[in-house]
Image (cartoon, rainbow, N blue to C red):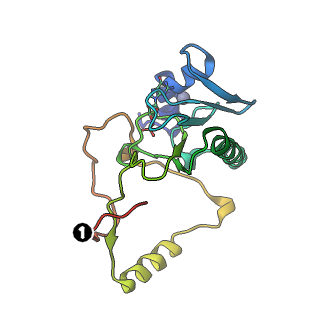
Amino acid sequence: MAQTQQDVLKASKEQCIFCKIISGDIPAAKIYEDDRVFAFLDINPVNAGHTLVVPKDHYIVLPQLPDDLAMHLIKVVKYLSGAIFEMTGAHGINIIQNNGAAAGQEVPHVHFHIIPRIQDDKSIGPWNRSKIDPEKLKQIAEEMGKNLKPISSSTVKLSSNTAVSKKTSKPKRKGKLVKVKRRTSTNSP
Ligand code: 5GP
Ligand code: ZN
């Protein structure tokens, strides 16, 4: 029988380390909690104060969140990033949110990383950026625009390639994004 999105969510919740942290079954250094959101320090911080902000309900990737929960989660991320700026004296902050193994997601429970940065700390590597013909850029934007539905009717259907915690598994089909020429020089995000 075909697995529904609900089946996928249920199975991944049973194994989920962040759900166990939220329920108190696994200890964590909590810094914030309300009725819908929980925030705690990353066990392997990029820098001191590296915080993870998660919804208490189990969802795997950001597009699955109900809008009101997504809005509240972002509100907490905004609040905590300001507080962490002040508390740590950071010069900058990265907000990182990985969706799917291909994007580096290891824990299949939606989370935002708030990472305090000090000038030139080099703790997060430069992005591998690319050059692209402006005409091609226009063509991609038109194609993407055509496929966007009105925001109020937004729903998400996950591809099986969005699996997480399967770093070694190969996607079943190639991604649709066009190929771009890699730039040779390094660039900061
Ligand atoms: P991802 O790669 O999925 O975006 O990030 C997952 C993050 O969760 C990693 O930075 C990792 O260090 C953190 N993490 C994994 N397991 C635990 C844990 O048991 N406790 C805490 N506090 N953080 C964890
Ligand atoms: Zn979970």
Which image quarter is the N terminus in?
top left
For label 1, the crowd category at 10 Å Cα-Cα, with few meaning under 14, some 14 to 19 and many 20 or more, is few
Count every numbered label the image shows and give the total: 1
The image position of residue 148, as x and y in percent, is 55, 68
| Whole-percent x, y for residue 114 in the image | 56, 43
Residue visible at 42% across and 52% down in the picture = 120
Determine the residue located farthest toward the right in the rendered image: 35
User: In the rendered view, does 43 fall on the left or right side of 30?
Assistant: left
The quadrant holding residue 83 is top right
Position of 88 relative to 152 (above/below): above
Identified by mark 1, the residue type is Thr
Outermost bottom residue: 135
| Front residue of 155 and 65 | 65
**View extreme (top): residue:** 25
Image quadrant holding the C terminus, namely bottom left
SS for callout 1: loop
Residue depicted at 65% across the width and 28% down the height = 31
Q: Is residue 39 above or below residue 79?
A: above
- Between 37 and 67, the residue placed more toward the observer is 37
Is the residue at mark 1 in contact range of ligand 1, meaning its CB lies under 8 Å from it?
Answer: no
> Residue 57 in the image: x percent, y percent?
63, 32
Q: Provide residue 45's location: percent of width, then percent of height.
A: 46, 33
The residue at which mark 1 appears reads as 184
Q: Nearer the viewer, residue 73 or 152?
A: 73
Q: Image check: 15 left or right of 66?
A: left
